[in-house]
Amino acid sequence: LLWLTIDANSNSLVVYDEAKLVRRFVLALCFQSWSQKSSWTHKDWWMTPANECQWFGVACDEHGEILSISLYKNQLSGSIPTQIALLSKLSTLNLNSNSITGPIPTELGHLDNLVAFNVRGNQISGNIPTDLGRLRMLQNFSLESNRLNSSLPDEIGNLTSVKYMSVASNQLRGSIPTSISYCTELRLLSLNFNGFTGTIPSEIGLLTQLEALSLKHNKFEGSVPSFIGDLKNLTRATFQDNVMTGMIPSEIGMCTSLQDLRLHGNHFTDSIPTELGSLKGLQKLVVAHNRFSGPVPSQLGNCKNLTHLDISYNQRMEGTMPPELGHLSYLESFEFDFTGLTGTIPSEICSLLDVGLTTLHGECHKCDCCTNC
C-alpha cells in the first residue's frame, strides 16, 4: 500500500488528508474490480505514487476533487464498486464499451453532481435502481446495450435535467411511465430493442424539446397519438416493428422539422395521410409492411428532399401511382412492390433514374424501368 502514502515527487512518506486518502482508495477499488478478467488497454499511472489526477482517464478540479472517470473502450471487466459513490464531486462516469458485469449500484444515487452516466455496451444486469431518480443534475444517461431486465421506474421522471436518455437494446419490459412528462429537457429518448408494452402515453407530447423519439422493436400497441403534432423540434421518429394499429394522425403534418419517419412492420390502417406532403425537410419515409389502404398521396411530391421512400407490402392500397412523385429529384431509393396499385409507373418517375435514383423496386409487369422486381 505504499502507493497510497508516498509522494511521487520526493519519493518519501507523506500524511495525506482524509479526503485524498478516500479518493485514492476508491480508485484502487475500481482498479481491482475492473481488472478481473483482462488487462486494461490504458492504465498509465494507476496504482503508482503519482497524483491520482494524473492517472489515465481521471480528471480533477483545482482542489484535487475527482470530477470525471472516463475509461471507455479500455477492456474493463468486473462490477462497479459501490464505494464510487464516495466521490461526491464526480460529474462524469463514462465506462462505455467494456465488459462490466453485475448490477448498477443503488449507491450511485448519492452522486448529486453527476451530469453524465454512460455504461453503454457492457454486460450489466438486474434492474434500473429507483435511487437513480435522485440524480437531478444528470443530462446524459445511457444504459444502452446491456442485460437489464426490469421496468423503467417511475422515478425516472425526477431526472428533470436529462437531455439524452437511451436504454435501448436491453430486456426491459412494462410500459413507459407517465412521469416521463417531467423530463422536459429531453432531446433524445431511445427505448429501442426491448420488450416494452402498452400504448405510447400522451404525456410524451409535453416533451416539446424532443428531437429524436426511437421506439422500434418493442411490443407497443395502439395508434400514433395526435400529440405528435406538438413536437415541433422532432427530426427522427421510429415506430417500426411493434404491434401498433389505427390510422396515422393528420397532426403528423405539423412536425415541420421531421426528416426521418419509420412506421414499417406494424398494423396501421386507413390511408397514408396527405398531410405528410407538408414536411418539406422529410428525407426518409418508410411505411412498408402495414395495412394501409387508399391511394398514394400525390402530396408526397412536395417532399422535395426525400431520398428514401418505401410503401411496399401494403396490399390494400389502390389507384395508380401519382406522377407528382417525379418531382422528387433527390430520390435514391423507391420501393413499392406488393401494394395493390394498378396501372403502370408514370414516365416522370422513370426519368428519376437519370438524376440519381438507383433503386426502383416494384412489380415488373407494372414497371418497365424498375431496377429490381
Image (spheres, rainbow, N blue to C red):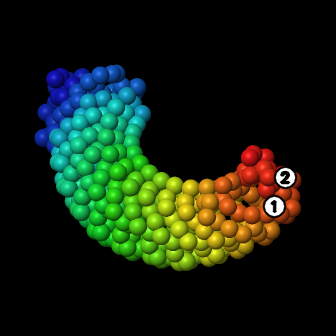
For image coordinates 74% across by 52% down, the residue present is 363
Identify the residue shown where x is 43% and y is 58%. 243
> Which of the two labelled residues, at mark 2 and mark 1, occupies the earlier sequence position?
1
Residue 17, numbered circle: none
Q: Is residue 307 above or below residue 270?
A: above
In this picture, residue 86 sits left or right of residue 77: left
Residue 190 pos. (x, y %): 42, 55
- Give the labeled residue for mark 2: 368
Residue at mark 1: 344
- Distance from disc 2 to disc 1, alpha carbons, whole Å, reads 8 Å
| Residue 231 image position (x, y, % from top left) | 48, 73
Are the residues at dot 2 and dot 1 in contact (C-beta closer than 8 Å)?
A: yes
User: Residue 334 or 282: which is nearer the viewer?
Assistant: 334
Residue 304 picture location, percent across and down = 73, 67
Give the quarter of the image for residue 178.
bottom left
Q: Would you say 264 lies left or right of 33 here?
A: right
Instruction: Classify mark 1: residues with Cα within 10 Å, few (<14), some (14-19) or many (20+).
Output: some
Q: Nearer the viewer, residue 10 or 294?
A: 294
The number of discs equals: 2
Residue 219 appearing in the image = yes
Label 2's element? loop
Q: Is residue 142 visible?
A: no
Q: Quadrant of the N terminus?
A: top left
